[in-house]
Image: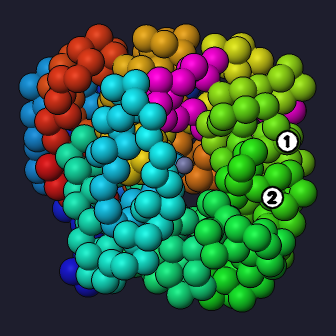
């Protein structure tokens, strides 16, 4: 198409409930709900939303058949460049048996041994799986290579499939540096950062007992920021610690997990623009205590909901599953959980072109085989996503 031609326009009409995430549209709620709605797409953008009866004329027409339409899910936290399998570890944990193999280290060994083609094939498979379940924007991280070459290649592979790529050389201290963690921090902030920064937008660190402490995390994130990467942090997942307050201090885009929070941590999150990203797949898969979403929401914190899809502690690519868990066990209303999995994820990635369906936004949307978004929690485990559109093109 030449630039002087206009892209074909398509209306999706007969939508029982449309989630726009724009309070100025529809019913004025945070979800900006419109009943009996239509969405008009031109090229890769939304150009109009409103009541069906008022929709402008278009070239094409799609009948949603009284179903619900939502923005595509924005999954702002995953670890999808890996090889190997940790079924045995999960089975042992869920069977109450001790399991002494190395957790993340098992995946690191398998990932280092895999070819680029094997790593990319795995990534493509999990991204396709996520897309079928309604995810149209995904972040993914390195962190299973932990050498200069293995981290850089993981990020280069990820960057071929998403703009939201995160350098996580500071996932754990690898066994080869067990005796000298300071030397590993020097590598992560030096040679490895130089090799990885061209492929990444974000830098992340696992700030936790047994991984990296607050001083190490500050040094790593500060070095990344100086190299043009924006911080995000794995914070306060397994225990109380400095991660959340460090995230706010460094204006990180998000503090992820937020399971063990003091009142000062909650106050810090409420005072800044750092998003609290909750990852209930991890608590589910490790039988750990849930993060308290209600406490964060009541304090005015912006909350995102993501999968943390990874082979060790949360091997799910399903945002609908996470929505159901958040509603059942974390005190979120269905409306809040849907907002957090769409607009909240976009906020955690500092994006305003996704996570909402309003004029100017990217035409990333899903059609549920249900009359409203509430069914995502009301009908847990049921594959309700019946169509997925990305950049104005139907892909599922
Ligand atoms: Zn993670």
In the rendered image of this protein, does residue 287 appear above or below residue 352? Answer: above
Q: As rendered, which of 5 and 45 lies closer to the eye?
A: 45
Q: Is 285 within the magenta?
A: yes
In the rendered image of this protein, does residue 357 appear above or below residue 253? Answer: above
Q: Determine the image quadrant of residue 194.
A: bottom right
Q: As rendered, which of 45 and 205 lies closer to the eye?
A: 205
- Drawn side of residue 368 relative to residue 28, left or right: left
Q: Which residue is at 77% across, 26% downward?
A: 261
Q: Is mark 1 within 8 Å of ligand 1?
A: no
Residue 206 position within the rendered picture, expressed as x and y whole percent measured from the top left: 68, 53
Q: Residues within 10 Å of mark 1 (few under 14, many from 20)?
A: some
Q: Determine the image quadrant of residue 109.
A: bottom left
Q: Determine the image quadrant of residue 373.
A: top left
Residue 242's mark? 1
Residue 44 position within the rendered picture, expressed as x and y whole percent measured from the top left: 32, 61
Q: Which residue is at 83% across, 23% downward?
A: 262
Residue 79 appears in the rendering: yes
Quarter of the rendering occupied by the N terminus: bottom left
Q: Is 92 within the magenta?
A: no
Q: Which residue is at 33% across, 83% downward?
A: 116
Q: Give the spatial CA distance, label 1 vs label 2.
A: 9 Å
Tag 2 residue: 217
**Magenta residue span:** 268-292
Secondary element at tag 2: helix
In the rendered image of this protein, does residue 327 appear above or below residue 305? Answer: above
Q: Which residue is at 72% across, 26% downward?
A: 260
Secondary element at tag 1: loop
Residue 113 position within the rendered picture, expressed as x and y whole percent measured from the top left: 37, 79
Q: As rendered, which of 396 and 206 lies closer to the eye?
A: 206
């Amino acid at each position: 198409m030449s630039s002087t031609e206009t892209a074909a326009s398509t209306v999706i009409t007969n939508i029982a409930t449309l989630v726009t995430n724009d309070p100025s549209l529809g019913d004025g709620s945070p979800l900006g709900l419109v009943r009996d709605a239509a969405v008009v797409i031109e090229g890769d953008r939304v150009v109009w939303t409103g009541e069906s009866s008022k929709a402008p004329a278009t070239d094409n027409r799609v009948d949603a058949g009284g179903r619900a339409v939502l923005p595509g899910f924005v999954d702002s936290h995953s670890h999808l460049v890996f090889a190997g399998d940790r079924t045995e570890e999960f089975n042992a944990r869920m069977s109450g048996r001790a399991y002494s193999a190395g957790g993340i280290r098992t995946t690191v060994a398998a990932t280092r041994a895999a070819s680029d083609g094997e790593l990319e094939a795995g990534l493509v498979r999990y991204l396709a799986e996520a897309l079928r379940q309604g995810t149209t924007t995904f972040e993914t991280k390195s962190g299973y290579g932990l050498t200069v070459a293995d981290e850089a290649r993981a990020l280069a592979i990820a960057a071929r499939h998403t703009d939201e790529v995160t350098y996580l050389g500071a996932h754990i201290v690898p066994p080869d540096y067990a005796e000298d963690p300071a030397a590993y921090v020097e590598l992560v902030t030096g040679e490895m950062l130089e090799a990885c920064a061209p492929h990444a937008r974000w830098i992340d660190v696992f700030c936790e007992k047994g991984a990296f402490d607050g001083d190490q995390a500050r040094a790593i994130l500060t070095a990344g920021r100086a190299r043009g990467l924006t911080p995000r942090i794995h914070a306060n997942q397994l225990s109380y610690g400095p991660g959340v307050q460090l995230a706010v201090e460094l204006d990180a885009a998000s503090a992820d997990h937020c399971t063990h929070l003091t009142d000062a941590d909650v106050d810090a999150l409420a005072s800044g623009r750092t998003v609290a990203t909750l990852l209930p797949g991890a608590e589910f898969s490790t039988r750990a205590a849930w993060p308290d979403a209600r406490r964060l929401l009541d304090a005015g914190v912006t909350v995102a909901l993501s999968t943390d899809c990874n082979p060790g502690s949360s091997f799910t690519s399903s945002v609908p599953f996470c929505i159901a868990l958040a509603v059942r066990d974390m005190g979120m209303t269905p409306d809040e959980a849907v907002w957090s999995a769409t607009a909240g994820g976009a906020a955690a990635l500092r994006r305003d072109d996704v996570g909402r369906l309003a004029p100017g936004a990217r035409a990333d949307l899903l059609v549920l085989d249900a009359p409203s978004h509430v069914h995502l929690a009301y009908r847990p485990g049921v594959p309700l996503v019946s169509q997925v559109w990305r950049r104005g093109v139907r892909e599922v």
